[in-house]
Image (cartoon, grey):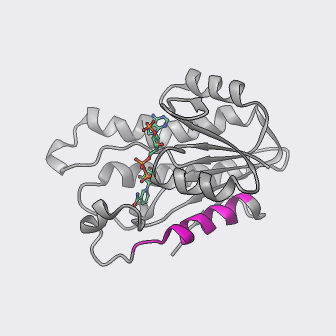
């Protein structure tokens, strides 16, 4: 299977690329330092990425920039980081990517438990996650040619200890749990699902 991983240089993306490259052809993408350069806040950059990558079977996104910080600093401008990044960036990966993906292919987007379990400093991510999760359910009944779409929605993950203090009471998701949630989406048959790896 040919799999594009957007966000492949990040904490989640690096793990997934290493896990899947043993059995699949992986195209890594991020703003820098990957096989293909892409800025998901730019539709033309996304289009260029798909043109460079060529036809593919699965798109995994672990790229979802948002504003993280205190409520007092959450301005209109700050909030748009998540709107243009995690929300529209990932939605455009699908809207544009549907014209390049092979029949029976799949899209797997990243959201997070903040959509239904908010924590302080993360209102922007909560809102973006909720929008992406609703989009996934809607897109699942629209996409043609057997193309599937799911979101993976973890709480804080074990390789991000810097976030542990912001998620009191949450048991961190292991990298194996995270990986297997993505496996369920990419190699399984479900669509329109919000997959919680915990
Ligand atoms: N870490 C956690 O505990 C956790 C838990 C639940 C949900 N999440 C969500 O999961 C996502 C990934 O988390 P992570 O910890 O793996 O993040 P990360 O380590 O910061 O990695 C983010 C990746 O996305 C890429 N990226 C960022 N902005 C981009 C843009 N505009 N265009 C293209 N690529 C872009 C980065 O590449 P460049 O550096 O080249 O920009 C990097 O490869 C985030 O949306 C986060 O909210 C994280």
**Magenta region:** 172-186
Q: Is residue 66 left or right of residue 187?
A: left
Q: Is residue 71 left or right of residue 54?
A: left
**Residue 156's spot in the image, x, y percent?**
39, 65
Q: Tell me the quarter of the picture where residue 20 sits.
A: bottom right
- Is 63 or 77 nearer to us in this picture? 63
- Is 4 or 32 nearer to us in this picture? 32
Query: Does the stretch in magenta take in 161?
Result: no
- Residue 24 in view (yes/no): yes
Relative height, residue 168 to residue 179 (above, below):
below
Q: Tell me the quarter of the picture where residue 44 sits.
A: top right
Considering the whole magenta stretch, tell me its main secondary structure: helix
Q: Residue furthest front?
A: 22
**Residue 30's spot in the image, x, y percent?**
52, 36
Residue at 24 percent across and 67 percent down: it is 165
Residue at 41 percent across and 68 percent down: it is 158
Relative height, residue 160 to residue 92 (above, below):
below
Residue at 61 percent across and 51 percent down: it is 17
Q: Is residue 14 left or right of residue 183?
A: left
Query: Does the stretch in magenta take in 183?
Result: yes
- Residue 196 in view (yes/no): no
Q: Residue furthest left?
A: 72
Residue at 76 percent across and 56 percent down: it is 23
């Amino acid at each position: 299977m040919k799999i594009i991983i957007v966000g492949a240089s990040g904490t989640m993306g690096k793990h997934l690329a290493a896990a899947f490259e043993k059995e699949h052809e992986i195209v890594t993408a991020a703003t820098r330092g990957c096989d293909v350069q892409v800025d998901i806040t730019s539709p033309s950059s996304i289009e260029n990425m798909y043109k460079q990558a060529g036809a593919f079977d699965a798109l995994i996104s672990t790229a979802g920039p948002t504003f993280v910080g205190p409520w007092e600093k959450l301005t209109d401008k700050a909030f748009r980081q998540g709107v243009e990044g995690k929300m529209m960036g990932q939605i455009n990966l699908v809207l544009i990517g549907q014209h390049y993906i092979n029949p029976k292919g799949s899209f797997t987007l990243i959201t997070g438990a903040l959509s239904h379990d908010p924590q302080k400093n993360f209102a922007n991510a909560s809102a973006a996650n909720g929008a992406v999760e609703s989009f996934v359910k809607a897109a699942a009944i629209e996409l043609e040619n057997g193309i599937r779409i799911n979101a993976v929605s973890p709480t804080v993950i074990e390789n991000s200890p810097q976030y542990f203090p912001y998620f009191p009471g949450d048991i961190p998701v292991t990298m194996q749990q995270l990986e297997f949630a993505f496996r369920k989406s990419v190699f399984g048959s479900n669509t329109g699902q919000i997959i919680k790896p915990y």
